[in-house]
Image (cartoon, rainbow, N blue to C red):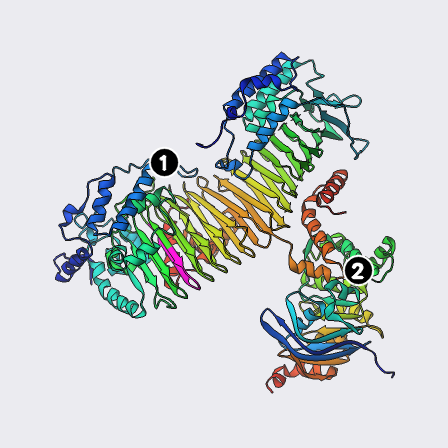
Amino acid sequence: MANERIIKELMNPNDLDSFSSINQENAWLNGYNKESYLKLLERPIPSNKNEEWRYTKISEAVNQFFLKAKGNKTLPYEFNDDESFDDDIRIYFYNGTYFHQGELPAYITTLKISQDHPYFESKIYDGNKSNDCLINALNTVLLTDMLSIETKSNQKIDKMIRIINLSHKDSALCPRISVNLAKNSSIKIFEHHQSSESSVLNSNIDIQLEENSTLDYFRLIEKQTQSHDLSSQKINIGENSRVNLFCLDSGADTSRSNIDVELDGDNSAININALFTPSEALHSGNQLKINHNAKGTKSSLDFRGILDDSSAGVFFGKVKVHKNSSQTTANMSNQNLLLSDYAKISTKPILEIYNDDVECSHSATSGNLDDEKIFYIKSRGIDEESAKKFLVQSFAAKIINKITHANMRETFNNHLLKSLKIN
Amino acid sequence: MSAKKTLLSIENLDASIGDKNIIKNLNLKIHYGETHAIMGPNGSGKSTLAKALAGHPDCKITKGTIHFKNIDLLTLPVEERSNEGLFLGFQYPIEIPGLSNSVFLKAAINAKNKYQKLNDVSATDFIKELKQKADMMGINQSFLSRGVNEGYSGGEKKRNEILQMLMLKPTLSVLDETDSGLDIDSMKIVSKGINSMLGEDTSSIVITHYERLLKYIKPDVVHVFHNGRIIKSGDYMLARELEEKGYEWLTNE
Amino acid sequence: MDPDNNQVSNPEIDNLIEKNYEYGFTTDIESETIAPGLNEDVIRLISKKKGEPQFLLDWRLKAFRHWSKLKEPAWGQLNIEKINYQDISYFSAPKLENAPKSLDEVDPKLLETYDKLGIPLHERAKLAGVAVDAVFDSVSVATTFKKKLLEAGVIFSSFSEAVKDHPELIKKYLGKVVPYRDNYFAALNAAVFTDGSFVYIPKGVRCPMELSTYFRINEANTGQFERTLIVADEGSHVSYLEGCTAPMRDENQLHAAVVELVALDDAEIKYSTVQNWYPGDEEGKGGIYNFVTKRGDCRGKNSKISWTQIETGSSVTWKYPSCLLRGDNSIGEFYSIALSNHHQQADTGTKMIHLGKNTKSKIISKGISAKKAQNTYRGLVTIAKNANHSRNYTQCDSLLIGDKCGAHTFPSIGVNNSSSILEHEATTSKISDDQLFYCIQRGINEEDAIGLIISGFCKEVLNELPMEFAVEARALLQVNLEGAVG
């Protein structure tokens, strides 16, 4: 693209040394930071001519990322995590480090505590190779610690693994997680980006499922003020395995999530149910690429946007059914409520199908609350404001009610109401 | 019989939808304790009257007055008309997926209590009453936690309207073609519900095409609507006559 | 008349051929082909030969200079062999010399198709490009036709005639809806277009008949770079049919046409197309590249533009008839059937740009792919900030027949105000085995059964076609599906 700027125009090669949060102790890790940085300098910053970045202005996020990287400071621990469910495993990412209270179970390790550098190095190497995107490259530059969750065959873990990302003011944070599920195993992960101010969070997760395994994955991104939240999720699903992903994104100056799913094994499935609820002048961008690479695979995407004030929402979904993936089912839906005349939505639900043995559908809607419904509720004695709140909630309930995990349903519902300013 | 008190008084009413004047100089008085049936062919303005009473935003009153309990109804917003005790049973009840019946009904009852400066209904009392009335209307308990009218059949929707009426205990119920699309069993259940509400202090307007509902709910007065006004009033026998002869003998006059 | 016995020596026919030159130029046919290649001199020559006014030449040259700077677009879903633009001859009069002299010389497969479509004998020759007969039969039609239109005040002529007779209208509207800067092929067309149709419906006039290129005798072989301009003045109404239901013989590989529609206050234009150019053989050899830019400007209040298209031909189709909804309360519609078989590639769809208040658009797209064909719907719906209370409804369905074909949908939707309502639905599936079995059990053979199911699948679009056209279109779908099974 002719008019795309190269990152080099923003940064100079020597700036890397000033990225204070980089762990200088680990020479090999520092090598990855450096390599990624030097490669990044040659990368263009995607402009709005680039189809995938058309409605997400990434240049400011990239700019802020480097600015904050230079000024990253280590701060004393100072946070509150008010939702406690005693059974959960809790891991925090703060100041560029994963930490936790008490002992971690054997299936979770962090790079910081592990003695096995080659093991982590191979994960970083493989992750970078399979996910060569801008978000991943940025993540690698500031990579200091990594979390690895790896089940054994037949291991079913009922406890929720809560990973809480805590950004502090003027910080750039790059959490990175690797998840591997062996045969017949199952886990639940809850990734929580707490609300923050003036920060850049760039999170990467690499997920692989072998046969017959199940991952329930919850992502909650609270409202970020004067901040940018970039994330990349790479998910490979093996035979008869399934991932259920729930997201709630309340928006940031730039909130952008790239979800790439490879349905590699026969009868593998992905279910994504998501709400995005930006308000004020915030943005929420959702990019999904689902590849059906095997027989009997299923994908179901249900995204609902509730957009208030002058916020902007983006949905870009591309479902591709490859030649040999017969008996595929793919459903993609993006419905949007525009609560203000200044809110905007852009949606692209794309289907690319190279096989005839498919049942695929996609739909998209946009509109405000239905006047007839408002009248019906008011005719039962309820005032207009409450009627509207009921309708907004009922719109979101379609997603919330799909969460079968009771604690999570409650958590998501509470955050939803908070985000919508409904008490 | 003592002098009857007036509940609803409509005088010289003109009402339009869009640019079209539908109700033309309508006069109607309903006393406490009375059931009035309004019959008439399609497009005669029956449903517009229901909309005018409930305050539907599409329906514009261009002339005349409506007094309900001696209050100028036209000055009240939709929800306050309801809180004053006016209930509209919708011809096409609205589906609100994701908003559960019980949450919705409780909010409505509490809104009315608040309007009347009463306390919120207790959760246990509410559930108890709701279950009892749902039983009466033949509505399965599992429906109560489902979305309002979500995926209901036509008959279920109408029974749900009557359930809402029973819970809200209005002074005046306006039932807009509640009988349409009902099979004979539902018809019996619906009329049982309506009859259980009737008493000295409540009134109802039953809008219908057919006489069959009126067999179960004996109206005190039957009005025939045509071109936005009442062209004939009578007792139940008028409904019987209409069933036999159709409307033409009246409308062709 | 028996078309098999056509002789070129018929005096009436000679007359007609003469008539063809009347609007062109008077030199000998053979010398009328400019040597292949494209440069400013070629454009000056085209313009001179057509006796065009200076403004048109200037416009052509500007378009050419712009085009020279552009890169040929590369689209994701299309697989196209490189086109050498310097190998094309940009001006050529009807190639009567090479045309078959009688139906005996015409490809028997083509004749078989006509038979199945039930095309009347006297029309077959024209369609197959036999130089004479068909026009002969159409003369009387054309004449009565023209007289009737003249009485109504409707202008319906070739583009070249219009440039001579109504330069002020051409100057006012040409390139206003599709500027030459619009895209690569629009720029190329603007530089080198040779002819096309012009329609003007005066204020308050309801065009007394369906206008059709089919009856315009001088339309034959207007060539690769056709340009159509239709202007419906305030309160007028016109229905325009383009193409015909039988495959047309055509020697040109590349077709890059431009169609511009303008509807002023309260005007309505209905534009229907049946496109059945040569799709190439079963191996995908040959066939037409059909790169068309079609756009309608609902400029006036309460105006309406409706596109209906049945796309069954060409090896590659690239076409997005669009509506610019500028006037308040204006309406845009797009009804499309795109059927691709064997190695055909169809990339088609629409753009609906809502700018005026209370504007409405409706998109119904049905794509069918069979064998190794690829079918893509590409659509854009934008509702601008100030286009309050606008509505869009889109439904695009794809049907797949066989496991080597592809169906793709690329909708792009942008809504910038809260009072507008947008709904988009799309499905992709294979032809239902249950439906097929049901039909076959009732004694219908598989091929016919597929035909029946497809015409059911396409019903909403077929219903938009004028009656007699719809019947032919149904037959056409059936014929084009031949060999799709098994």
Q: Point out residue A92 in the picture as x, y percentages from the top left corner.
A: 73, 26
Relative image position of residue C384 (x, y in whole percent):
52, 50
Instruction: Establish if B122 lies above or below B73.
Output: above
Residue at (25, 39) in percent of width and height: C39
Q: Is residue C271 magenta?
A: yes
Secondary structure of the residue carrying tag 2 is: helix
Question: Is there a contact, CB below 8 Å, between mark 2 and mark 1?
Answer: no
Q: Nearer the viewer, residue A208 or C347?
A: C347
Asked whether A123 or C181 is in front, the reply is C181
- Magenta: main secondary structure: strand
Q: Amino acid at mark 1?
A: Lys
Start and end of the magenta stretch?
Answer: C261-276
Is B196 or B23 nearer to us in this picture?
A: B23
Q: Which chain does tag 1 point to?
A: C
C18 above or below A54? below
Q: Chain of mark 2?
A: B
Badge number at residue C71: 1
Residue in the image at 68% along x and 60% along y: B94
The residue wearing badge 2 is B134
Residue A41 shown in magenta = no
Q: Quadrant of the C terminus of chain C?
A: top left
Give the number of the disc on residue C99: none
Quadrant in the picture for residue B195: bottom right
